[in-house]
């Protein structure tokens, strides 16, 4: 499994990079798997592939606060990301991991690895898996996740709320149309929590702890993803043509 912690300049390029990694694995004649972690530098709303734009997002608030809105190519509901919200992606070969073709099994296996890695930076509470693929602390959500399958490969990616401005959620997002039972109709500000609350370590040291823990979870030997200039151009082109296109973002 190859590893990357490279953050590209824009949210659209980072979304495109996840798709590019999946497509690269699917097109290869060899078994390719990837693990990626990255940290957004700007705030954005990212809605799911099947999300209805105006049902899940408050576009007026987002425009006033310069928060971009993008649509990812995996499922799930809208999330808000930005500084203090860490992102990960893992691309897995279903020919080598046939049990993951059952998506219920995939959710359980992948999220158990993410949960155990995230526990390293959460010193004040035990992290649990609730709903389909949420991680929670004290019954509050700290991680949202989604997946997509292309040919014989699975992309699983998601978020970790570490030291994020949680007040943005209530402004950027409307009440979600689909809610897990454990939410119990709570508004955003009562439903979510940061992992690093009460932790004395700084973000850089927490990031290193998380990096080492998630690499151990996936048995990664820190071999970097080889990305050429032409690869980066392809990712940038995909970002421009798809992820920055209103036709894609507002398709539903």
Image (cartoon, grey):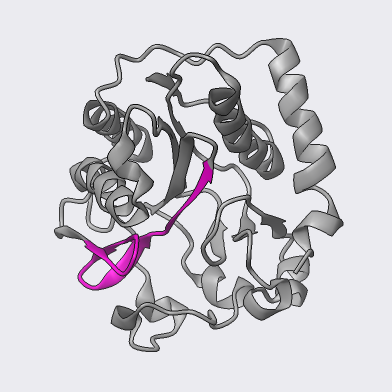
- Closer-to-camera residue (177/160): 177
Report the residue at 75% width, 38% height from top.
Answer: 239
Residue 139 in the magenta stretch? The answer is yes
| Residue 177 position within the rendered picture, expressed as x and y whole percent measured from the top left | 54, 82
- Closer-to-camera residue (228/43): 228
Count of numbered labels shown in the rendering: 0
Q: Write down the quadrant of residue 212 in the picture.
A: top left
- Closer-to-camera residue (212/101): 101
Q: Is residue 158 above or below residue 55?
A: above
Q: Write down the quadrant of residue 230 in the picture.
A: top right
Residue 157 in the magenta stretch? The answer is no
Report the residue at 47% width, 26% height from top.
Answer: 5
Q: Write down the quadrant of residue 71 in the picture.
A: bottom right
Report the residue at 38% width, 29% height from top.
Answer: 95
| Residue 202 position within the rendered picture, expressed as x and y whole percent measured from the top left | 32, 40
Q: Is residue 155 above or below residue 135?
A: above
Q: Is residue 196 left or right of residue 177?
A: left
| Residue 94 position within the rendered picture, expressed as x and y whole percent measured from the top left | 39, 34
Q: Which residue sits furthest bottom?
A: 185
Looking at the figure, which quarter contains the N terminus? top left
Magenta region, residue range: 129-149
Report the residue at 34% width, 60% height from top.
Answer: 133
Q: Is residue 17 above or below residue 82?
A: above
| Residue 152 position within the rendered picture, expressed as x and y whole percent measured from the top left | 48, 34
Which SS does the magenta portion mostly show?
strand
- Is any part of residue 200 visible from this angle? no
């Amino acid at each position: 499994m190859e590893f990357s912690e490279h953050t590209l300049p824009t949210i659209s390029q980072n979304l495109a990079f996840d798709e590019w990694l999946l497509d690269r694995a699917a097109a290869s004649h060899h078994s390719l798997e990837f693990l990626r972690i990255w940290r957004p530098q700007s705030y954005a709303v990212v809605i799911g592939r099947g999300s209805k734009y105006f049902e899940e997002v408050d576009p007026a608030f987002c425009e006033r606060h310069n928060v971009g809105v993008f649509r990812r190519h995996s499922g799930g509901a809208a999330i808000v990301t930005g500084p203090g919200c860490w992102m990960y992606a893992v691309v897995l070969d279903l020919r080598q991991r046939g049990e993951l073709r059952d998506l219920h099994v995939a959710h359980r296996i992948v999220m158990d690895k993410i949960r155990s890695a995230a526990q390293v930076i959460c010193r004040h509470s035990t992290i649990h898996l609730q709903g389909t693929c949420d991680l929670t602390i004290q019954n509050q959500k700290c991680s949202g996740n989604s997946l997509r399958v292309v040919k014989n490969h699975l992309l699983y990616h998601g978020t970790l709320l570490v030291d994020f401005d949680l007040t943005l959620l209530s402004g950027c997002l409307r009440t979600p149309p689909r809610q897990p039972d454990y939410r119990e109709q709570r508004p955003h500000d009562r439903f979510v929590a940061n992992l690093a609350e009460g932790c004395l370590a700084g973000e850089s040291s927490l990031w290193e702890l998380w990096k080492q823990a998630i690499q151990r979870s996936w048995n990664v030997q820190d071999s970097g993803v080889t990305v050429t200039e032409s690869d980066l151009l392809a990712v940038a082109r995909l970002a421009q043509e798809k992820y920055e296109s209103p036709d894609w973002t507002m398709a539903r």
